[in-house]
Image (spheres, grey):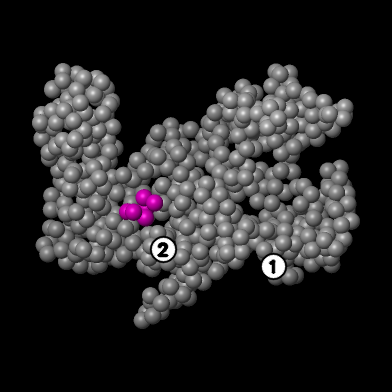
């Protein structure tokens, strides 16, 4: 019996009792949890029944409790004010829930409310003029976590990466290499391709401060690229390939996966036909410039959502310039339609920084005005900045928090922690590398996911790697501790077969089982609200509840063999839950830390 089935069974018992007392079944019941473990396992508020039964919620709860029949599932019911508190028999509460988790393993909290809908999660969207930085790691951690959770909820997920591989900023790297590179390559310099190209982007910024005329050369190079100049295209393709190879290494290192890549060089001309069609539908309007020049094509934003300008005029956004050239909005309209057409999407989630909130509000409003039914399924998962003591990252000045360097630094800190914990039994070099990679990755991802996406983060490397506190390594360590217990139990011949679950039920065990029960609903809320942070918090709270249980109670040496078996069952189920939760966040686990 999984947690959802258990809750449905309890609701049915409450409905039967209410019908017996009030001669009609309740129209609506909601399940929650009492604030204190001693009050019961589940709580049902009776506020929504007051109008139906024409009685106070307090009286309704009291009458239902008095007439609740005991059963294999329900041990007793008690009214506390307007709430009906339910105590489930420990045989069911622990035996059925833990048994279901152990049997299903990582699928124990999976849901099917997604109905196999096709969802594209577009994330990362790097520029090919520089390596990935800490902000990209936050984007990537969010993108993978959302993808994993949506898949677990029963959706078909397509992970997409729209790479910004054209434009004047790309030409800056190209021009700098052409003028000062002397034929150097990533191989000849022993540098990752994305770092190599990034050096030339920084070099351009330095040289442009001394020679403003370089801006004209960059614009000329962009014109050559747009006109298809063979030499410029060869240079562009060569340098982009260097960057793609470098990106790929970082993707693998950080566990980022993609099913499809879109490139701005292929999509930047899209959208003009949509604008022309929208003009015919009067969705867009041509607006002549004040100086009497050519007409821009604009979209007037609905006043009820966007308000008006300070001077009282309607707010608008340009979707096509007067010379017929497109803007980001133009190509985003075209790309949105392309994605839906190619993959028959039901939903499209864009993981993009919070500075683009207005852009996506406008984009989605335009798509709705154009009459696309799928526009209702477009969502922007916006996220805040990641700060360090130096302040906001500025890649053009070369002061970027490089992703590869950060990963290496965190892994170095992880290695130090591991060595300190294994002084008496030093690890083989390869095992140390494996552990520091998994712990380091988990530290970064958890730190970036543990707060709501819109919240800015002040990243503290040393705090992130701590084995104590609200961190990834803390959760990983709880799982490793469980793995050690289960190994020892196997060695001693202990088993979780034929467990007497009635032996469980102390305060720490009840708190822990409550966290296991809540995994399904926490996943559902995390998916519906696009909040991976909620799942991260729940995983941490589960690890904390297990540690509280383990620190206070013996498991293998519980006193009797039967109690040891029962606690081993709870321990094993906790391990499955922690591993599943961490995996949903894109974090691997270790059997030994």
Residue at 24% across, 25% down:
49
Quarter of the C terminus within the rendering: bottom left
Which secondary structure lies at badge 1?
loop
Instruction: State left or right for residue 445 relative to residue 283.
Output: left
Instruction: State left or right for residue 344 relative to residue 419.
Output: right
Q: Residues within 10 Å of mark 1 (few under 14, many from 20)?
A: few
Residue 264: quadrant of the picture: top right
Residue 498: in sight, yes or no? no
For the magenta stretch, what is the residue range? 537-542
In the image, residue 538 lies in the stretch drawn in magenta: yes
- The residue that label 1 is drawn on is 191
* 1 or 2: mark nearer the eye: 2
Mark identifier at residue 355: none
Residue 111: quadrant of the picture: top left
User: In the rendered image of this protein, does residue 355 appear above or below residue 292?
Assistant: below
Mark 1 or 2 closer to N-term?
1
In front here: 545 or 438?
Answer: 545
Which secondary structure lies at badge 2?
helix
Q: Marks 1 and 2: CB-CB under 8 Å?
A: no
In the image, residue 396 lies in the stretch drawn in magenta: no
User: Going by the picture, which residue comes out furthest to the bottom?
Assistant: 424
Residue 513: in sight, yes or no? yes
Residue at 84% across, 65% down:
180
Residue at 75% across, 62% down:
202
- The residue that label 2 is drawn on is 473
In front here: 208 or 247?
Answer: 208
User: Going by the picture, which residue comes out furthest to the front?
Assistant: 311
Instruction: Give the image location of residue 462, x and y in percent.
Output: 48, 68
Secondary structure mostly seen in the magenta stretch: helix
Instruction: State left or right for residue 323 relative to residue 129.
Output: right
Quarter of the N terminus within the rendering: top left
Count the marks: how many?
A: 2
């Amino acid at each position: 019996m999984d947690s959802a089935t258990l809750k449905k069974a309890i609701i049915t018992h409450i409905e039967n009792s209410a019908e017996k007392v009030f001669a009609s079944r309740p129209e609506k019941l909601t399940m929650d949890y009492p604030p204190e473990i001693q009050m019961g396992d589940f709580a049902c508020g009776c506020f929504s029944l007051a109008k139906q039964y024409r009685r106070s919620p307090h009286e309704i709860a009291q009458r239902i409790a008095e007439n609740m029949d005991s059963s294999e599932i329900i041990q007793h019911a008690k009214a506390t004010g307007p709430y009906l508190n339910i105590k489930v028999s420990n045989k069911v509460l622990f035996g059925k829930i833990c048994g279901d988790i152990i049997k299903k393993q990582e699928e124990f909290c999976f849901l099917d409310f997604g109905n196999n809908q096709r969802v594209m999660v577009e994330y990362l969207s790097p520029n090919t003029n520089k390596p990935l930085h800490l902000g990209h790691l936050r984007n990537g951690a969010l993108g993978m976590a959302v993808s994993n959770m949506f898949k677990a909820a029963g959706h078909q997920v397509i992970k997409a990466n729209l790479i910004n591989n054209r434009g004047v900023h790309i030409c800056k790297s190209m021009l700098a290499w052409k003028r000062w590179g002397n034929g150097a390559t990533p191989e000849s310099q022993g540098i990752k391709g994305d770092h190599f190209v990034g050096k030339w982007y920084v070099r351009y910024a330095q040289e442009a401060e001394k020679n403003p005329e370089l801006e004209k050369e960059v614009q000329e190079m962009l014109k050559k690229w747009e006109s298809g100049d063979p030499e410029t295209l060869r240079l562009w393709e060569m340098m982009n390939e260097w960057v793609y190879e470098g990106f790929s290494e970082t993707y693998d290192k950080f566990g980022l996966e993609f099913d499809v890549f879109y490139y701005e060089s292929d999509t930047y001309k899209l959208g003009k036909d949509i604008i022309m069609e929208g003009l015919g539908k009067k969705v867009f309007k041509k607006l002549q410039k004040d100086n009497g020049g050519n007409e821009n094509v604009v979209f007037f934003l609905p006043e009820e959502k966007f308000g008006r300008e300070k001077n009282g005029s309607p707010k608008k956004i340009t979707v096509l310039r007067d010379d017929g050239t497109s803007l980001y909005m133009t190509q985003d309209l075209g790309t949105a339609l392309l994605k839906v057409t190619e993959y028959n999407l039901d939903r499209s989630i864009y993981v993009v920084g919070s500075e683009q909130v207005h852009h996506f509000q406008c984009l989605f409003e335009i798509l709705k005005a154009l009459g696309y039914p799928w526009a209702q399924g477009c969502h922007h998962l916006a996220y805040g900045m990641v700060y360090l003591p130096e302040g906001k990252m500025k890649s053009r000045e070369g002061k970027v928090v490089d992703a590869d360097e950060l990963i290496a630094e965190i892994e170095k800190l992880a290695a130090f922690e591991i060595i300190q914990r294994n002084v008496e039994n030093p690890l083989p070099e390869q095992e140390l590398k494996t552990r520091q990679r998994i712990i380091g990755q988990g530290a970064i991802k958890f730190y970036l996911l543990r707060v709501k996406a819109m919240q800015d983060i002040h990243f503290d490397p040393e705090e992130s790697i701590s084995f104590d506190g609200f961190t990834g390594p803390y959760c990983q360590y709880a799982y490793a501790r469980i793995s050690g217990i289960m190994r020892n139990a196997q060695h001693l011949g202990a088993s979780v077969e034929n467990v007497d679950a009635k032996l469980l039920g102390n305060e720490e065990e009840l708190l822990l089982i409550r966290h296991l029960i809540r995994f399904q609903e926490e996943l559902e809320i995390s998916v519906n609200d696009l909040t991976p942070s909620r799942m991260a918090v729940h995983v941490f709270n589960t690890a904390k509840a297990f540690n509280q249980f383990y620190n206070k109670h013996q498991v293998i040496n519980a006193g009797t063999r039967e109690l040891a078996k029962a606690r081993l069952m709870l321990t094993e189920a906790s391990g499955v839950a922690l591993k599943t939760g961490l995996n949903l966040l894109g974090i691997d686990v270790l059997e030994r830390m």
